[in-house]
Image: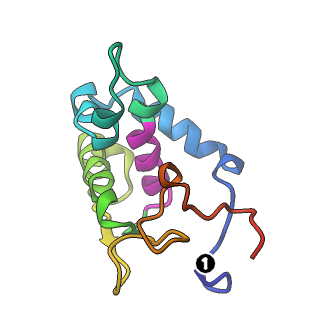
Amino acid sequence: MDPDKATFFRQSDIPEVTELTWILSTVTPMGLLRGATLVKTRSIRVGPPHGTVLHPVLMAADILIYDSDIVPVGKDQKQHLEVTRDIAQDERPLWRRAAAHPRPLHPRERRQGPGIDGEKMSKSYSNDIGLFEEE
């Protein structure tokens, strides 16, 4: 990303994202969240941790708070946009526009962000690039 064309900031510096996440979490049906791929893959005997279940709501808050039209995502993250649309549809009075309908923006040549080994980037694969790493 080009720093001259994009604004970088820490999500934790924007308390409104956390506040919107809480508000959305109080009205988002658990059935919608249980269907999320991340939640299904992290399930253990007693169920996934609350943070895992809440993650799709946090991503929805990240998208909706900025009234985003286009969201850069890998093809494996398309479901997050679908959950965001579902949440926005259910809570239509909260949004300035009729409803949020963010569209995915995929990199032209790749459908996933590459890690340092050229494969899909993931902390699980230990091939991610940390925000504060040296060049």
Image label count = 1
Please report the bounds of the magenta region as a residue range: 55-67
Query: Helix, strand or loop at disc 1?
Result: loop
From this viewpoint, is residue 100 visible?
no
From this viewpoint, is residue 8 visible?
yes
Q: Where is residue 129 in the image (x, y as percent from the top left)?
A: 61, 65
The answer to which quarter of the image holds residue 24 is top left
Q: Mark 1 points at which residue?
A: 6
Quarter in which the N terminus is drawn: bottom right
Q: Position of residue 66 (x, y in %)?
A: 50, 60
Residue 121 vertical placement versus 89 (above, below): below
Q: Which colour scheme is used?
A: rainbow
Residue 113 vertical placement versus 130 (above, below): below
> Which residue does the image show at 38% across and 44% down from the upper left?
94
Q: Position of residue 53 (x, y in %)?
A: 39, 31
The answer to which quarter of the image holds residue 40 is top left
Nearest the viewer among 99 and 63 is: 63
Residue 22 in the magenta stretch? The answer is no
> Which residue does the image show at 28% across and 42% down from the upper left?
37
> Which residue does the image show at 27% across and 40% down from the upper left?
36
Please, what is the dominant secondary structure of the magenta stretch? Answer: helix
Nearest the viewer among 68 and 108 is: 108
The answer to which quarter of the image holds residue 2 is bottom right
Q: Using a 10 Å C-alpha cutoff, classify the residue at mark 1 as few (fewer than 14 neighbours), some (14 to 19) or many (20 or more).
A: few
Residue type, mark 1 in image: Ala
Quarter in which the C terminus is drawn: bottom right
User: On the picture, is 102 further left or further right than 126?
Assistant: left
> Outermost residue toward the top?
46
